[in-house]
Structure formats: C-alpha cells, structure tokens
Amino acid sequence: MIAWLESLPTLAAGFLIVGGFVLSTLVMGYLVAAYTSREIREEHNDRAGFILAVIGVVYAVLLAFVAIGTWERFNLAEARSYEEAQALATVYRDAESFPHPEKLQAMLQAYVRSVIDVEWPRMRRGERAAAANELLEAADRYVRHLPVTSAGAADVQAQMLAAMNTALGDRETRLTIDFIGINSIMWSVLAAGAYITVAFTYLFGFERRVMQQLMIGGLSLMIGLVLFLVVGLDYPFRGSIAVGPDAFRTLLEYWHVNPG
C-alpha cells in the first residue's frame, strides 16, 4: 500500500492521504455524534481533556521523531550523492598525473552515464543495477595498478585511492538508504495513533457541531499533512519527492561530456 502511494504523482498521493484521512475522521465524528448524546460528553470534558493531553503528547512525539528521521535520511541520501560525485571528480582530475589518463577517465564517464541512464530509473523502482557497480569496481582496480615511478606519483595514487574508497562507500550508503524505510509495524502504529488521537477529540461536548467539525477537521488536516510528508520522504530515491541524479549530471558537464 505504501509503495503504491509513493509511486503516485505528488498531488494524487497528497489528495489520497490527506483528503482520505480528513474525510474518514469527519465520518467518524458523525458516527460518534449519532450514538452518544452531547450532554453526556459535556459532563466528562474535564477528565477527557486530561487524557487527550497525554495521548496528544505521546503521538506528537512519535510523529515528530519519525518525520525528523525520514527527513534526515532524505538529506543524507542527497549529501552522499554529491560526495560520491565529488570523489569521482578528484579521481578524474588526478588521472592527468599518469600516462594515458583517457582510459581511466573513459571508465569514470561510463560509470556516471550508467548511474544516470540505468541505475537511477531502477532505484526509483526499488531495484539495484549491478552493471554500474561493476564499472566502479573496475575503475578502482585500474587505479590500484597505476604505474608509480616516483614519490610524487605515489602520493597522487594514494589520494586517488582514498577518493575511490570514498566513492565506493558513498555508493553503498546511497543504495542501502534506498532500501531502508519505515517498516509495516511502525506504519500501523502511526495510522492507529492518528485515528485514536482524532477520535478522542469527538468525546468532547460542543454546543455547535459545525465548530467541532472545523476544529477537529483542522487537527486531522495537520496530522494528514505530516503523514503525507513522511510517506513522500520515506524512500529518498522513489516517488515524486525524490533525490535526482543532478550531482552526476553536473559532473558530466564539468568534464565537458555530453550526458546523452
């Protein structure tokens, strides 16, 4: 269900998540009002308010931690993409210190093109691309066997190896993040907590039902928006709100290589 929602366009997913949650809570309010009297609910407003405060704080803390966690993972995925591209730029530039740098540079160009044209579309579908990984590993092996004829060349090779290790590590982190999302149990707790929190507000007695619906509808809208944000950011490389291969496209432009 979550994977299907993430595959939808942003507006469609937002309408289904936010609109569906608000509509379902309003229907729930009508059912509560139909089977309980306003007088009975008004008699328990003080005690219900104390319990609602505890429920609201617990759910707010839970939702905040989940939202912050997904946002940090999204930012980490984007940062690792740029760090990987920066490391590749270092290797590409330092290749000029050795004879025939065009071979290593061509290998790096092929890897970057593979990331943009093959790997990124597969990542958006939650798949891995083994070809891109093999290209980067081949470039790493080539760097390790560069001809070192002086101390200066050894220093440059060491810098290139460090950059390759950074690129390999950033790549693995980037791919791992794409497969680490909120598990089904957590989603069940978030959904149940949202409905429990909103449902409890209907146990208060209001003199005018329209005011009750407006206030509780606003609460439902806020919770629905945060849930939509969590869904949108859960998998950084999937869905409409996703990290794109901009860092790698910029890299090809920097190398004066046609991305197509």
Image (cartoon, rainbow, N blue to C red):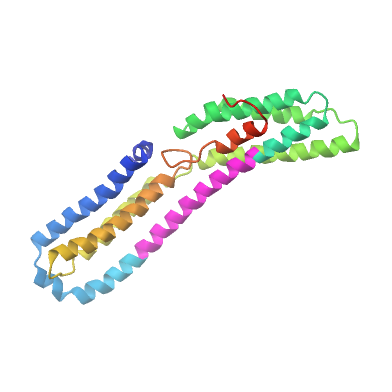
On the image, the x and y values in percent for residue 156 come to 82, 37
What is the quadrant of residue 103 in the picture? top right
Specify whether residue 251 is painted magenta: no
- Residue 70, percent across and down? 46, 50
Q: Position of residue 167 (x, y in %)?
A: 66, 38
* Image quadrant containing the N terminus: top left
Most common SS among magenta residues? helix
Determine whether, in the image, residue 139 is placed left or right of residue 76: right
Q: Quadrant of the C terminus?
A: top right
What residue do we see at 22% from left, 75% from top?
A: 47
Specify whether residue 78 is painted magenta: yes
Left or right, residue 124 beside residue 36: right
Image-based side of 109 in relation to 52, left or right: right
In this rendering, is residue 111 above or below 183? above
Residue 175 drawn at (x, y percent): 54, 38
Residue beneath the point at 44% across and 38% down? 238
Quadrant of the rendered structure where residue 152 is?
Answer: top right
Residue located at (53% from left, 29% from top): 119
Q: Nearer the viewer, residue 255 or 116?
A: 255
- 163 to 226, vertically: above or below: above
Identify the residue shown where x is 70% and y is 28%: 139
**How many labels were placed on the picture?**
0
- The front one of 7 and 54 is 7
> Which region shows up in magenta?
58-85
Which quadrant of the view contains residue 46? Answer: bottom left
Q: Where 223 falls versus 253 (above or below)?
A: below
